[in-house]
Amino acid sequence: MATTTNTFSSSADSFSGSLDAEGFTTTIAPFARISGVAPPAYDETKRVASFNHLYDLTPGESNDLSLEMRASQMVNNTNSAGIVVDEIGTTGEADLGSANFLLAEALGRSTLTGLSVEATEVHSESNSSFVVGARGILSGDASFRSLTVAGALVGGEALTFSGNAAPDTVLYSSPTVTITLDEQTLLLPPAAGVIGPTITTDAIDIRFNDAKFAGHTISGDFAIGQSSATTL
């Protein structure tokens, strides 16, 4: 059996993000995150049946801008078989039975929808592998049973998608809002905070850049179904 001084890691979480609205910053830490490092072999899973929370993005203001995040059947897994003959690899996977992201403005008894994202059977996967004497390989993948995006911030359109997404599929793009499916980010040292070649795969990445909605200016990023894999 060959040996290697390299170690490999992987992680997965259900969603995370940071949004700024009118100077108020709301940070949502990676939910149900799990990680592992090989060698030796590992196989770790975290399951959460459901999540439902309403975030007040503009506390204390008369116009109530909020983010409601709901999700069900979340299963995050990281695994590695350790060193097998002359090869070692690791995988991170994030799965959600359903995910619902709703950015809205409450006006009395009515509600204006800025952005609604509804998805079922969301899957994100990141892999790293290394064969002794050869270069390492990083890869990612994301898929959906169904996905519907709507709201004022996407021009009032209803955008849909299903199946496997090609890497970095841009579902919607404007100067202020970008929604990307299977967003794959590759980082190599000496990038900040990176200690080895890393791939991060977001099943859905939502990016705001001074987006205007209901009198508010919104910036930030939100990821649904994130996985990563690294060789150290």
Image (cartoon, rainbow, N blue to C red):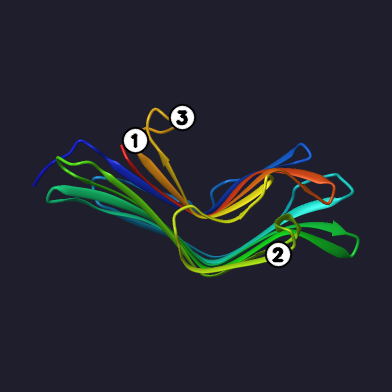
| Residue assigned mark 1 | 196
Residue 90, percent from left and from top: 30, 51
Disc 2 to disc 3: CB gap under 8 Å = no
SS state under label 1 = loop
What amino acid does circle 2 point to? Answer: Glu
What amino acid does circle 1 point to? Answer: Gly
Q: Is residue 67 visible?
A: yes
Residue 62, percent from left and from top: 89, 48
The residue sitting at 87% across, 50% down in the picture is 63
Choose between 194 and 136: the one closer to the eye. 136
Residue 61's mark? none
Residue 157's mark? 2
Q: CA distance from mark 2 to mark 3?
A: 37 Å
The residue sitting at 22% across, 48% down in the picture is 88
**Dividing the picture into quarters, in which one does residue 112 lie?**
bottom right
| Residue assigned mark 3 | 192
